[in-house]
Image: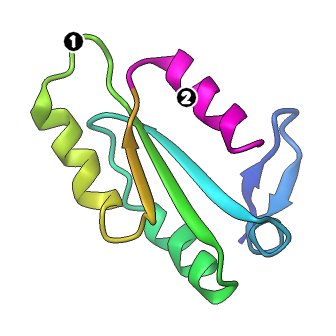
Amino acid sequence: MKAWLSDLAGHALDLVEEIAQSDFAVVITAAGEDAQSVSVIAAICALHHKTLIALIVPKDEDDDAAIVVSLKYLRPYAHMLVVAHGCDYVETMLTALRV
């Protein structure tokens, strides 16, 4: 799990340790993207009793089918699942969560 995650500067982080030290985890995906890897994050969250929050960000041209693809992967794992309406919504949500 080391080097599976990196910070904004590109430095490798230990995913397990990052989740263990957090209050919760937030995953963000574009609508229609394959979000299967969220199962790994969810398993680590469960191991450390952390809440998993998922945000899906549709593009203007995305239809409901694209959102459903992402929902299929995220719904079994997320404690809170939000279909965001644009990047501004994501920023507002992260601010509200004090991330």
Using the image as rendered, state which of residue 13 and residue 88 is in the foreground: 88
User: In x, y percent, where is residue 24?
Assistant: 68, 63
Q: Considering the whole magenta stretch, tell me its main secondary structure.
A: helix
Q: Which residue is mark 1?
A: 61
Compared across the picture, whether 37 is left or right of 59 comes to right
Which tag, 2 or 1, sits closer to the chain's start? 1
Q: Which residue is mark 2?
A: 90
Residue drawn at 75 percent across, 74 percent down: 16
Q: Which region of the structure is painted magenta? A: 85-99
* Nearer mark to the viewer, of 2 and 1: 2
The residues bearing labels 2 and 1 have C-alpha atoms spaced at a distance of: 18 Å
Quadrant where the N terminus lies? bottom right
Against 42, residue 90 (above or below) is above
Q: Which image quadrant for residue 64?
A: top left
Quadrant where the C terminus lies? top right
Q: Amino acid at mark 2?
A: Val
* Other residues around mark 2 within 10 Å, as few (<14) / some (14–19) / many (≥20): some
Residue drawn at 74 percent across, 68 percent down: 19
User: In x, y percent, where is residue 29?
Assistant: 44, 40
